[in-house]
Image (spheres, grey):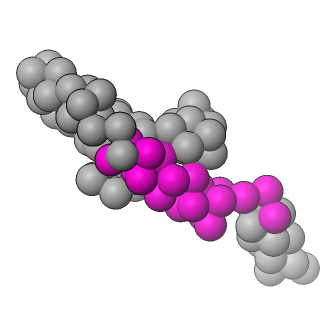
Amino acid sequence: RVEIEGMALEGAIIVSEIDGHKELIQHGDTGYLFDLNNPMELTHLVEVLYNDKNKAKRMGASAKNYCFENYSAKLYHATLLFSFRSFT
């Protein structure tokens, strides 16, 4: 998913509040969620990150840490191996 790739590259992520994003983004920590029916909220969040480069940098670092703790290839393979072993 493109969101995870952005997080891995220390991007400050802004995504709409749809189900897949709600499980991925911790609002205000690893990124921002906005109401899809509220374009002014999106505008505001973009301005927040544009005007506060330190916040954007901290959020990007937090997103990268979250990404590698929860979506690393090593973790994925371990989970997959565990699943396969549970079938045998």
Who's the residue at 34% across and 57% down the image? 29
Locate residue 85 relative to residue 49 in the image: left or right. right
Q: Is residue 24 above or below residue 84?
A: above
Position of residue 65 measured from the top left corner of the image (x, y, whole percent): 57, 61
Residue 78: quarter of image: bottom right
Asked if residue 84 can be seen in this view, the reply is no
Who's the residue at 36% across and 46% down the image? 54
Tally the numbered discs. 0
Q: Quadrant of the N terminus?
A: top right
Position of residue 39 measured from the top left corner of the image (x, y, whole percent): 14, 19
Magenta span: predominant SS is helix
Q: Is residue 72 above or below residue 86?
A: above
Q: Assess whether residue 62 is covered by the magenta stretch.
A: yes
Locate residue 72 relative to residue 43 in the image: left or right. right
Q: Quadrant of the C terminus?
A: bottom right
Position of residue 80 measured from the top left corner of the image (x, y, whole percent): 79, 65
Who's the residue at 9% across and 21% down the image? 40
**Front residue (pair 49, 26):** 49
Locate residue 53 relative to residue 65 in the image: left or right. left
Bounds of the magenta segment: 55-74
Q: Assess whether residue 1 is covered by the magenta stretch.
A: no
Residue 70: quarter of image: bottom right
Position of residue 5 measured from the top left corner of the image (x, y, whole percent): 62, 37
Asked if residue 51 can be seen in this view, the reply is yes
